[in-house]
Image (cartoon, rainbow, N blue to C red):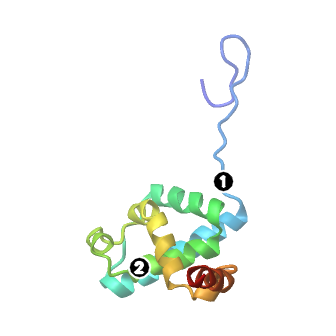
Amino acid sequence: MGHGEPDLFGVGRKAKQKKSAPLGMTHALQRLFGVYRELYEHRVQEPPVILKQHGAFLKTLITKYGAEKVEQRLRLFLTSEDRFIVDSGFALDVFYRQWNRLAVQAQNQAPRSSIPDADRTADYMKRMSNS
């Protein structure tokens, strides 16, 4: 019995359709894999191994945080001197698992004024400690 042919009860089977990513997601994934490949090859001098599951990791991050933020963190990841990240071979599954750590590093590298009301909070804390 082939796809779509009726079974014993005369009920046709539905052909399974593969879900494809929306065009915007596909473009974002292609861009991120391109950035990853370029930075990896620059750093390691050979192409990376990219597995099917890596696409799922990136897709999850893009959906939750947006492609721009994922690209920023990917660049931070591939320029990291962190021993764990370097020893992992800059693998994309490690990038996914280290997302929170990279978020903290990104915040630490951001100019202080980019944190909403940071200056006012610092002034307030200074006044409180002087009281």
**Secondary structure of residue under mark 1:** loop
Question: Type of residue at label 1?
Answer: Ser
Q: Nearer the viewer, residue 129 or 73?
A: 129
Q: Nearer the viewer, residue 90 or 123?
A: 123
Distance of label 1 from label 2 (alpha carbons): 28 Å
Q: Quadrant of residue 42?
A: bottom left
Q: Residue at left 60%, top 80%? A: 125
Res 78 label: 2
Q: Is residue 48 left or right of residue 72?
A: left
Q: Nearer the viewer, mark 1 or mark 2?
A: 2
Mark 2: give few (<14), some (14-19) or many (20+) Cα within 10 Å: many
Image quarter (top left, top right, bottom left or bottom right) of the N terminus: top right
Q: Residue at left 64%, top 31%? A: 3
Residue matched to label 1: 20
**Secondary structure of residue under mark 2:** helix
Rendering coords of residue 121 (x, y %): 65, 80
